[in-house]
Image (cartoon, rainbow, N blue to C red):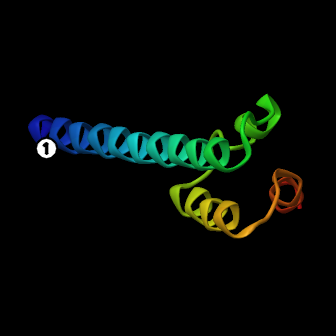
């Protein structure tokens, strides 16, 4: 029984690590897209992405691609 618990524990930790890696990668890609399109971005915008789900970050990336200015993106971000 202890082996099964350890195995489940290890699996859960591994899944959390994978999820965190995906979130970090999506966050970095979103920041990269914003910088490439609009130059330097405010720190508070970058901070706003922390803790967001991969799905939310991907949605924000779609918005970042579709807007014409950083101001327009920020309005979407802080709605």
Q: Is residue 14 above or below residue 60?
A: above
Q: Position of residue 10 (x, y in %)?
A: 22, 37
Seen at 65% across and 39% down, the residue is: 50
Q: On the image, which quarter does residue 56 sit in?
A: bottom right
Seen at 61% across and 42% down, the residue is: 31
Q: Quadrant of the N terminus?
A: top left
Viewer-proximal residue, 50 or 77? Answer: 77
Residue occupying the far top of the picture: 43
Seen at 10% across and 37% down, the residue is: 3
Q: Position of residue 52 (x, y in %)?
A: 63, 49
Q: Is residue 71 above or below residue 50?
A: below
Q: Is residue 15 above or below residue 67?
A: above
SS for dot 1? helix
53 to the left or right of 73 = left
72 to the left or right of 40 = right
Seen at 52% across and 56% down, the residue is: 54
Mark 1 is surrounded, within 10 Å at the Cα level, by few (under 14), some (14 to 19) or many (20 or more) other residues, namely few
Viewer-proximal residue, 37 or 26? Answer: 37
Q: Quadrant of the C terminus?
A: bottom right
Total count of labels? 1
Q: Which residue is mark 1?
A: 4
Q: Position of residue 26 (x, y in %)?
A: 49, 49
């Amino acid at each position: 029984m202890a082996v099964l618990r350890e195995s489940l524990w290890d699996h859960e930790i591994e899944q959390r690590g994978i999820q965190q890696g995906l979130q970090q990668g999506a966050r970095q890609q979103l920041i990269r897209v914003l910088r490439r399109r609009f130059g330097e971005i405010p720190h508070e915008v970058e901070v706003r992405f922390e803790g967001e789900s991969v799905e939310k970050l991907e949605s924000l990336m779609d918005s970042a691609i579709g807007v014409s200015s950083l101001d327009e993106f920020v309005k979407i971000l802080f709605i």
